[in-house]
Image (cartoon, rainbow, N blue to C red):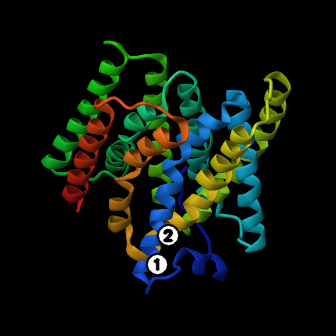
Amino acid sequence: MRAQSSATAAPPIAVATAEPDRPGFGTLQAALGVIAFSLTFPATAWGLEGFGTWSLVAVRSVLAAAIAGGALLWLRVPLPDRRHWPGLAVVGAGVVLGFPLLTTLALETSTTAHAAVVVGLLPLTTALLSALRVGTRPSRSFWIAALAGAAAVLAFTVQQSGGALTTADLYLFAALLVCAAGYTEGGRLARVMPGWQVIGWALVLCLPPAVPVAALALAQEPVHLTAHSVAGLLWVAAGSQFLGLVVWYRGMAAIGIPKASQLQLAQPLLTLVWSVLLLGEHLTVAAPLTAAAVLVCIAVTQRARG
């Protein structure tokens, strides 16, 4: 839901580098982050049972920003340098607003299992944009694996959609691009700021537009509060968009990005499991097979990058 970040104060630095000498605990925290992210789509589907698309996305952003802003104030984190705000705006536009909105629109007509397979391509998309952003030259095996993963997902979406891409598929592919842009810019900022603060400040930056949109959406879209819709909203706001990222970045600080990234390979498959257990969806054989194929391609790209 994401994130990377900043600061000079002693408490934030301590958070960002927590548990460097306890790799087992760091692995546990990174794994908890992956579990939190894997629940995002099922929680969104639950939220849509009681909220409209715009209401769910806007209220989610407001609640997450309130949590992040409270944490930043409590730890007395100083404001980022002015030169970092454009990058934070990209993170906010991609991770805080763009990705949640586009995936929520997609989930109005798409199953979470279908969305999980398509968005499973996110690590590859991020790697490609990152290579373009920093000017690196990935190996031939990297590009072959990336293209193979993209081809697998494209074939899956076309097959599942009866030979043509649907509007939901277009939303999901657009979500891949904007989220990858946000991750790439956040990764750059994470070199000069503790990771959790990047998403924290990006959330705070998105609060001014999110508040009026939330008020307008709640006035226009009917709201039917149910246990599922409230639980879904609270999870995507607190679990996916903030707390999941906190433990994820603490875990990365402890065990390193390569090892943590290996854990994230399981995220699409976990989402498929949640879609069955929590939503009662019926998986086609193509869904887990495509997710596994993408997992292999991502593993190859990470090995090639290393």
The residues tagged by marks 1 and 2 sit, at their Cα atoms, a distance apart of: 6 Å
As displayed, is residue 233 above or below residue 155?
Answer: below
Q: Position of residue 212 (x, y in %)?
A: 82, 35
Q: Residue at x 64, y 52 (%)?
A: 202
Q: Position of residue 256 (x, y in %)?
A: 38, 72
As displayed, is residue 253 above or below residue 236?
Answer: below
Please report contact status of discs 1 and 2: CB closer than 8 Å, yes or no: yes
As displayed, is residue 269 above or below residue 150?
Answer: below
Dot 1 falls on a residue whose secondary structure is helix
In front of the other: 166 or 229: 229
Is residue 94 in view? no
Q: Which of the 4 quarters of the picture holds residue 21?
A: bottom left
Q: Which residue is under mark 2?
A: 29
Dot 2 falls on a residue whose secondary structure is helix
Q: Position of residue 87 (x, y in %)?
A: 56, 51
Q: Residue at x 59, y 81 (%)?
A: 14
Is residue 149 in view? yes
Q: Which residue is under mark 1?
A: 25
Residue type at mark 1: give it: Phe
Q: Residue at x 43, y 38 (%)?
A: 116
Looking at the image, residue 98 sits to the left or right of residue 78; the answer is left
Q: Residues within 10 Å of mark 1 (few under 14, many from 20)?
A: some
Q: Which mark is residue 211?
A: none
Residue type at mark 2: give it: Gln
Looking at the image, residue 145 sits to the left or right of residue 224; the answer is left
Q: Residue furthest top?
A: 163
Q: Quadrant of the C terminus?
A: bottom left
Q: Position of residue 224 (x, y in %)?
A: 79, 30
Looking at the image, residue 5 sits to the left or right of residue 141; the answer is right
